[in-house]
């Protein structure tokens, strides 16, 4: 993918009507020649973007006493182990929690209790703490560093449909930042797809409320 392709597509996005809110920019990649019934042809990976992704990532920590003070200071929200029982008894409360954060960070030594308490609600929503994203941490972890990393982390997921959609910036992001994020995602997919470029049908950039602009 050439730099000029990305920059020209960004110019095409900006020609649309302005909205009263700051729109994000999504990268949409349509896939082909994959059998998603086969686990080895599914896509599920986390990528640390080289540039800011243009939107705040909400992070919630599920912690024991060892990380409780850090969680209060460093995370957007937290649930202490002593409060797990309240969520286990109230499925609605667990559902609201699942929708309140983009990533959940779990203290490793209480992971069985986390799975027992939140698994049935978080699992189907793809919100269980994921070791691939660095979301299962030791009791002496630096939660501020974990949160900072997750602010630039995106998930590339295609398990049920042949499409990947993820944020790469917002309408105020410098073109250079968006370009570098697009290239990082595209190049990462090239290395993870069984047939590389032959598994990519088309690529688009899109504002939140705008029409897609074709890249490839």
Image: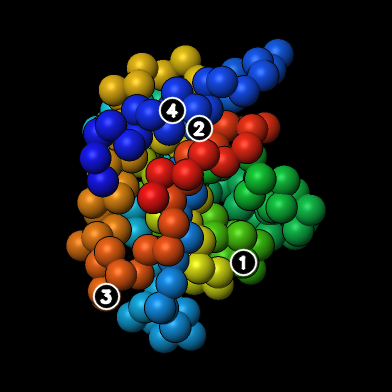
Q: Position of residue 42 (x, y in %)?
A: 40, 74
- The answer to whether the residues at label 1 and label 2 have Cβ atoms under 8 Å apart is no
- What crowding class fits label 4: few (fewer than 14 Cα within 10 Å), some (14-19), or many (20 or more)? many
In this view, the mark in front (4 or 2): 4
* Cα distance between the residues tagged 1 and 2: 26 Å
Which of pointers 2 and 3 lies earlier in the amino acid sequence?
2
- What crowding class fits label 3: few (fewer than 14 Cα within 10 Å), some (14-19), or many (20 or more)? some
Residue at 56 percent of width and 20 percent of height: 15
Residue at 47 percent of width and 15 percent of height: 172
Which of pointers 4 and 2 lies earlier in the amino acid sequence?
4
Which of pointers 1 and 4 lies earlier in the amino acid sequence?
4
* Cα distance between the residues tagged 1 and 4: 35 Å
- Along the line of sight, which residue is nearer the eye, 203 or 122? 203
Query: Element at badge 4?
Result: helix
Q: Which residue is mark 3?
A: 194
- Along the line of sight, which residue is nearer the eye, 102 or 7? 7
Compared to residue 215, the image places residue 91 above or below, namely below
Q: Position of residue 69 (x, y in %)?
A: 41, 29
Query: Element at badge 1?
Result: helix
Which of pointers 3 and 1 lies earlier in the amino acid sequence?
1
Which of pointers 4 and 3 lies earlier in the amino acid sequence?
4
In this view, the mark in front (1 or 4): 4
Which of pointers 1 and 2 lies earlier in the amino acid sequence?
2
In this view, the mark in front (4 or 3): 4
Res. 10 mark: 4
Q: Which residue is mark 1?
A: 124
Residue at 43 percent of width and 51 percent of height: 203
- Residue 176 falls in image quadrant: top left
- Along the line of sight, which residue is nearer the eye, 39 or 16? 16
Res. 25 mark: 2
* Cα distance between the residues tagged 2 and 3: 27 Å
- Along the line of sight, which residue is nearer the eye, 172 or 54? 172
């Amino acid at each position: 993918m050439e730099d000029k392709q990305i920059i020209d597509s960004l110019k095409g996005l900006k020609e649309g009507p302005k909205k009263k809110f700051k729109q994000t920019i999504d990268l949409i990649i349509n896939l082909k020649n994959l059998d998603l019934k086969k686990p080895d042809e599914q896509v599920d990976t986390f990528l640390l973007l080289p540039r800011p992704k243009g939107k705040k990532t909400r992070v919630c920590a599920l912690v024991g006493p060892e990380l409780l003070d850090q969680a209060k200071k460093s995370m957007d929200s937290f649930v202490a182990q002593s409060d797990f029982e309240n969520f286990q008894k109230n499925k609605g409360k667990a559902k609201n929690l699942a929708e309140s954060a983009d990533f959940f960070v779990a203290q490793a030594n209480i992971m069985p209790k986390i799975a027992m308490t939140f698994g049935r609600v978080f699992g189907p929503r793809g919100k269980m703490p994921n070791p691939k994203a660095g979301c299962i941490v030791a009791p002496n972890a630096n939660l501020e560093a974990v949160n900072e990393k997750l602010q630039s982390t995106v998930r590339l997921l295609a398990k049920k449909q042949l499409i990947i959609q993820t944020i790469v910036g917002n309408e105020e992001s410098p073109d250079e930042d968006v370009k570098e994020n697009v290239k990082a995602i595209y190049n990462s997919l090239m290395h993870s797809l069984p047939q590389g470029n032959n598994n990519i049908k088309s690529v688009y950039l899109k504002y939140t409320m705008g029409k897609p602009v074709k890249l490839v």
